[in-house]
Amino acid sequence: SRGPPSQARLAPSSRRARGRIAGARASACARARACARGGGGAMEVGEWLKRYSVENLGGFISGSVSLIVGHPFDTIKVRQQAGRTQYAGALDCARQTVRSEGARALWKGMLSPLLTNSAMGAITFSTWQEAQRLLHIEDGSHAPLGKVFVAGAVAGVVQCSLATPMELVRTKLQVQHEGSRVYNGNADCIRQVIRAEGLQGLYRGNVSMMLREAPAFGVYFSVYEGTKRALCPKLKPSDKEPMWLQAAGGAVTGGFTWAAVMPIDVISTRIQSLPEELAKVPEQRSIRRVAAQIFEEGGLRAFYRGLPAAILRGVVLNALVFPVYETIVERLS
C-alpha cells in the first residue's frame, strides 16, 4: 500500500513469530557475530530461506489486500494533489470521478503497484531487518526507537529502486481523465515515458521520493513499535501480542506517517505527474520550483491537499494490514 506512502506499509517482524523461532534467530545472530569476529560459523541457508520466504509471503498478502482496498483513497488523494481539477474536498473528488468516469476509475493505475508489491516488500522488509540487526544485536531486548527509525529510513531509501518507477506510472494513470486519455494502460505509459525521456525518465522524482520514503518508513516502523510499547509496556519481545494491539499500532502509525510526510508527497506527485514535454526541462521538475508553485497556489494549506483521504486510508488499512501480516507470519512460522 502506498502505506507510508509508496507501498503497502509492511509491519515489522511479528513478535509472536519471533516467540516461536526465538531460539533459531538467537543462535543465528550468535553465529553471525561469531563469524564477524572470525570465530567461524554461518546461518544455515535453509533456515534463512524459510524465514525470508515466510516474511515476504506475509508482506505480499497483506500488502495486496491493502492495495486493493485502499487504492480508491489513493486515487482521490493524488487527483487532489495534482491540481489539474479543482475539488471542494475528498468527497467532491470522489463524486466527480464516479459521475464522469464510473466507479472503476477509482482503481486506475493499480496494476503496476500490485505487480511490484512482492518485490518491494522483499526489499523493504529484508533491508529493515538487516539494518536493525546491525544496529541492535542484543538478544531478548527491545531495540531503541531511534534505531528502529534509522533502520526504517534505510529501508525506505533502498526500496525506491522499485517504488519510484511504480509510483510514476501509477500517478500518471490516476490523474488522467476519460475525456483526455494520454496513456492506454501501464505498458503504454512506460513506452511513452521511455520514448520521451529514456530509461532515466522512469526515475523522475527519485530525489523527492527518497526524501519522502526515508522519514516515512522511519516514522512508520518506530511509531508502530512505540505505540505498542506504550499500550503494553510489560510485553516482552518474545511474548504473544493480542491482535487488538497490532491493529491499534497500525492505525496510529498509518495516520501519523501521512501527516508527517504529506508536504513532500504533494511535491513528489506534482513532479511525477508532469507531461513528458514539460518533464524534459530540468527547471520544471525542480523540487524548489515545484514547491514555490504549490505555495503560490494556496500557501501552506496547499501542501496538505488530500490529507484527510490519506489519513483515513492509512488508519483503516494499517489497522487491517498489521494483524493480517502478523497472523500469516505466525501461522507459517
Image: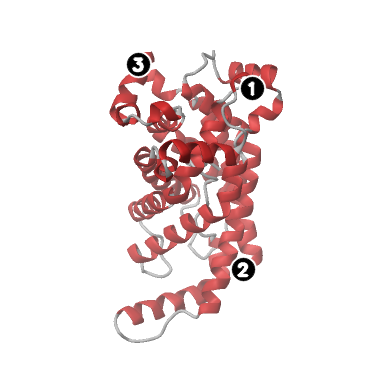
Q: Nearer the viewer, mark 3 or mark 2?
A: 3
Give the CA separation, mark 3 to mark 1. 30 Å
Q: Which mark is residue 299?
A: 3
Residue 188 seen by the camera: yes
Residue 271 vertical position relative to residue 200 in the rendered view, above or below: above
Taking the spot 37% from the left edge, 20% from the top edge, the residue there is: 294
Q: Give the residue at mark 2.
A: 333
**Left or right of residue 327: residue 160:** left
SS for dot 1: helix
Q: What amino acid does circle 1 point to? A: Glu
Q: Nearer the viewer, mark 3 or mark 1?
A: 1
SS for dot 3: helix
Taking the spot 35% from the left edge, 64% from the top edge, the residue there is: 136
Residue 244 seen by the camera: no
Instruction: State the residue in front, 251 or 199.
Output: 199
Q: Give the residue at mark 1.
A: 178
Q: Earlier in the sequence, mark 3 or mark 2?
A: 3
Quarter of the image that includes the N terminus: top right
Tally the numbered discs.
3
Residue furthest front in the image: 195
Colour setting: secondary structure
State the image quarter where residue 209 is shown.
top left
Q: Nearer the viewer, mark 2 or mark 1?
A: 1
Q: What amino acid does circle 3 point to? A: Gly
Position of residue 319 measured from the top left corner of the image (x, y, whole percent): 59, 43
Q: Earlier in the sequence, mark 2 or mark 1?
A: 1
SS for dot 2: loop
Position of residue 20 measured from the top left corner of the image (x, y, whole percent): 58, 70
